[in-house]
Amino acid sequence: MEKYIINGGNKLYGSVKIQSSKNSVLPILAATVLTDGKVKILNVPHISDVKNMVKILSCLGCKAVYDGDNIIIDSSSADCFEIPSALAHELRSSVFLLGSVISRFRYAKIAYPGGCDIGLRPVDLHLTGLKRLGVQITEKNGYILCKCDKLRGNEIMLDCPSVGATENIMLAAVKAEGTTIIKNAAREPEIEDLQNFLNRIGAKVSGAGSGTIRIDGVNKLEGCEYLPIPDRIEAGTFLIGAAMCGGEITAEGAYPENISSLIHKLTENGCKIHINNDKIVLENHKRLASVKSIETQPYPGFPTDLQAQFTALCCICEGHSIVTENLFETRFKYVPELRKMGADITVIDRNAFVRGVEKFKGATVVANDLRGGAALVLAGLAADGRSEVMGISHIDRGYGSFEYKLRNLGADIVRVTV
Ligand code: EPZ
């Protein structure tokens, strides 16, 4: 067990290099099962979700290894279609493997996926989409069993623009016979990144980023070397941290257009933000004004993955805010921990009602999920006094070298073994 010890109150100054997007790297790793060509993915963060995905690929018979900050995958020797339940439970993105494993083996067996405990997180849209492509699916004893003689392209209308379901169907359709059209597809930048990766290995995918994606089935795929897009949620987390602590930081290698909803809100709060190509500079030296309301929405709306971090910022702004979480049923589990730090915040259903206080007070708090844990760290950095954040294995799932990057910006944070 490890925890962070934080002495709050330092302003943040300097530059932070943004990692490749966790939520791009994970579906791209799943996609490597589709091809016998060698794939090299660049600038990959050393985070446990990626490490677990690499373990799953190895269980399928793929050769997958970290090479510094890159990962090299050779799936030519893949020979297993069953994803081990212990690993499947570790992360949500194990479910993305259904599409590529079925495409390769015509069979797939996986336990229900894990991931952050932020809601019910059903997989019905994944399974309905795969059935439309000709997959027969049985759900038994906590496993999803799939088989199909031949994957055939079809038109699929998603009830909601699910990121994972969009990606799973894309992967299953790449080598299907004929054309697949996905309507009401998710528009996140990571979907477009997956499309670009798939086309780089020889697939024919178009329309990602719009609500309609077209996949024309192909027979042969190759290998490639690929640099995924920067992690917009990591970039947003650091920018919010600087807004809370004060100072001036540069998020390097970030794509501002991918977090324009956050940039708009931080500007509304009173932050000075300067954009220069792939650098986002945020400067703040005062107590910020609250934004009256924030509603999480599918992209390009305000990202649910920045909801917790932004709510922590609202807690120390001047005035009241209402934060509405529209995507997940229970994504406010970090709120009782913020209240231990002096936050004045009440949650009713999907709304958090915040009354800004001057400062957080240092306290011992427990992370329950990845982004809620990051929010608690930011609160500790901005707080008066000493904080301890327990349960940081949740944070390690999505932030590589988190405390090193924060220390490089002037934060007083150390990781200790309990
Ligand atoms: C992806 O999760 C991300 N994870 C999440 O990031 C992110 O919060 C989420 O998309 C929304 O942007 C990865 O990419 C690995 P969804 P996913 O399917 O695919 C409902 C993080 O912190 N739904 O878009 O699981 C679902 O209940 C993580 O990095 C169904 O009803 O999200 C939710 O209300 C957390 N049936 C909504 O759709 C389904 O079959 C959005 O979920 C699938 C989803």
Image (cartoon, rainbow, N blue to C red):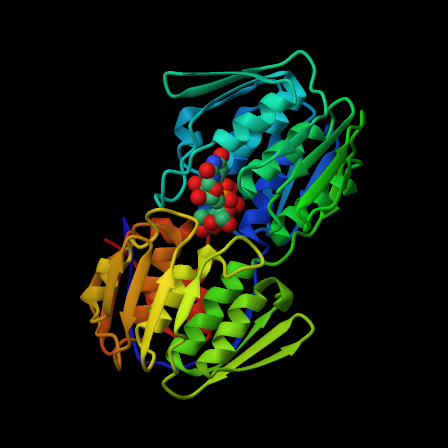
Most extreme residue toward the bottom, as rendered? Answer: 285
Q: Is residue 305 left or right of residue 212?
A: left
Name the residue rendered at 50%, 61% in the picture: 302
The spot of residue 194 in percent (x, y) is 67, 44
Name the residue rendered at 78%, 35% in the picture: 203
With respect to residue 139, does 1 lie above or below?
Answer: below
Name the residue rendered at 42%, 20% in the picture: 143
With respect to residue 169, does 149 lie above or below?
Answer: above
In-front residue for pair 78/229: 229
Q: Is residue 12 left or right of residue 312?
A: right
In-front residue for pair 324/390: 324
- Where residue 340 sits, quadrant-wise, is bottom left
The spot of residue 227 in percent (x, y) is 69, 52
Name the residue rendered at 54%, 67% in the picture: 261
- How many numbered marks are there? 0
With respect to residue 163, does 97 lie above or below?
Answer: above
Most extreme residue toward the top, as rendered? Answer: 149
Q: Residue 410: tell me if it is visible.
A: no
With respect to residue 97, does 266 lie above or below?
Answer: below
Q: Is residue 383 left or right of residue 183?
A: left
Q: Residue 122: tell me if it is visible.
A: yes
- Where residue 135 sits, quadrant-wise, is top right
The spot of residue 71 in percent (x, y) is 62, 43
The spot of residue 325 in percent (x, y) is 39, 55
